[in-house]
Amino acid sequence: MLNVIPEVPERIIRNEMVSQDLFKYNFDATFMIDLDGKFVALNSATTGLFGYSFEELRQMQISNILLPEEKDRLFRYFENSRYHAQWFETVIRQKQGSLLDVEMVVFSIIANNHFIGIYAIARDIRDGKMLKEQYKRISFHDSMTGLYNRTYFELEMQRLENEQRSSIGLILCDVDGLKSVNDTLGPDQGDALLLTVSNVLKASTDQKDLVARIGGDEFAVIVDQGDLSKMELVYNRICEALNDYNIQTPELPISLSMGWGFSPENRNSLTELYKEAEDNMYREKLLHSRSMCGSFVAALMKALESHDYISEQHSDRVQKSVTLMGTALALPNHQIADLRMLAKIHDIGKIGISDRILQKAGPLTPQEYKEIQRHSEIGQKIIELVSPLKPIAGYILKHHEWWNGKGYPLGIKGEEIPVECRILSIADAYDAMTNDRPYRMALSRVEAMVELKRGKGIQFDPKLVDLYLEIIKKREFKV
């Protein structure tokens, strides 16, 4: 009947894909069918409408109650529901044999991006008012936040355009870095962030204002019949609420790029108003991009520090060392800036490694050592998500490569290794040797310098080791 996909447990269909309130307390026949057309769940109203008992329906397929001439048409509706909700009228045959005209609306059930079944509401066509209201509610609201969705937003904009309202204000909002949060901290954290934004917007607006989620990370606020001061008031309320949230939740701050437009006495079309707000929003997003990436990376680094995987003092010392080396090599300023950032975030991938391995006191097993090596690749993937830092992502991948080719993960050697990585490996190793670790005492400066010399041509670039040792001697700099 429908295209076959991998089987999904019934509990997923019951617990995660549909609203329990709509299912359990619905006065209309409400049921779910799988891709074979079998009833997998139904409410008591379904037994009343179809005339079969609960046990009988659980052993039946939807095709058993459809008229032969209706089956193909209905199966097309079921198939098309994977793209949009389908609303139609049909005829069913009840258990006692009588025919009944019904109105039905069907929605797709999606799990892990797979179409796994149908969620349906049906009722006697003689009284379809309640069904239409439920369909309207589902059609015009975002399921996660409860806000109006883009469909309703566009209809409302068209209504306001047609009515030629005296003054209209529009605020467009884009959640900065949502993809980064989803990809690194998980979709649950991303959903929580979106819910926080929706709550901030609702709390910052009046009841007569319309708040909608119009995209994955985009929201809109229509301020109807307000003047310019009202627009500024709403905008400032949102900014203040976000600031309060970020003070209370510094570990994962929210950055929202906002732009607004205002049309007094309907001087501009609402298309022009939307374009004005959108242009202002994207202009602000450009300004936010670097500060947002800084906040995002800072939050991850703070998480690493809280678990004692890195220390701020270690990062500061290594940044000083690489700056001295970059200056001695007469590297351009932008390259030295990249070096400093690399020194700060090169171990960010440890956020994706098990605490059990990172905190293990004894020697690592071969499998554990292989796992911990993954932090270079994880770090690269994290930083690639933050556009302004993309040039550094490749350095993070290669910062454990050795001069003789026996490093990881690529096994490249010599000058195939970027100079930034060769500089960092020396500065990072020296700082690690000259500071206490849980499993050993610090080496003296002289002992650490001897170890660097031993690593020349093996782990480290020989010329850069000589340069680093010369810097230490000349400046008597305690790095």
Image: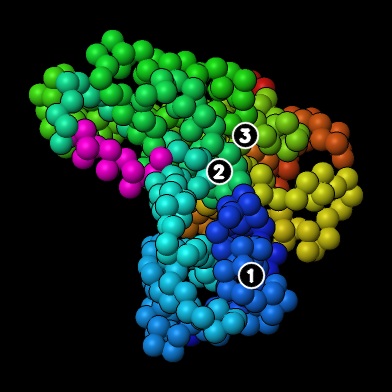
Structural crowding at the residue carrying mark 1, measured as other residues with C-alpha within 10 Å and reported as few (<14), some (14–19) or many (≥20): many
Q: Is residue 232 above or below residue 283?
A: above
Q: Residue at x 61, y 56 (%)?
A: 23
Q: Magenta region's main secondary structure?
A: helix
Which of the pair 280/364 is nearer the observer? 280
Does 382 lie within the magenta span? no
**Residue 49 seen in the figure:** yes
Q: Residue at x 55, y 43 (%)?
A: 191
Q: Which residue is mark 1?
A: 47
Tags 3 and 1 touching, CB below 8 Å: no
CA–CA distance in space, label 1 to label 2: 37 Å
Q: Residue at x 37, y 80 (%)?
A: 73
Which of the pair 182/385 is nearer the observer? 182
Q: Which residue is mark 2?
A: 191
Please identify the quadrant where the C terminus is shown: top right
**The quarter of the displayed image where residue 436 is located:** top right
Per the image, label 3 sits on a secondary structure element best described as helix
Toward the bottom, the furthest residue is 68
Q: Which residue is mark 3?
A: 301
Query: Mark 1: which amino acid?
Result: Thr
| Viewer-nearest of discs 3 and 1 | 1
At which x and y percent is residue 74? Answer: 41, 78
| Viewer-nearest of discs 1 and 2 | 1
What coloring was used for the rendering?
rainbow
First to last magenta residue range: 148-161
Classify residue 20 as left or right of residue 264.
right
Question: Which of disc 2 and disc 3 is earlier in sequence?
Answer: 2
At which x and y percent is residue 8? Answer: 64, 72
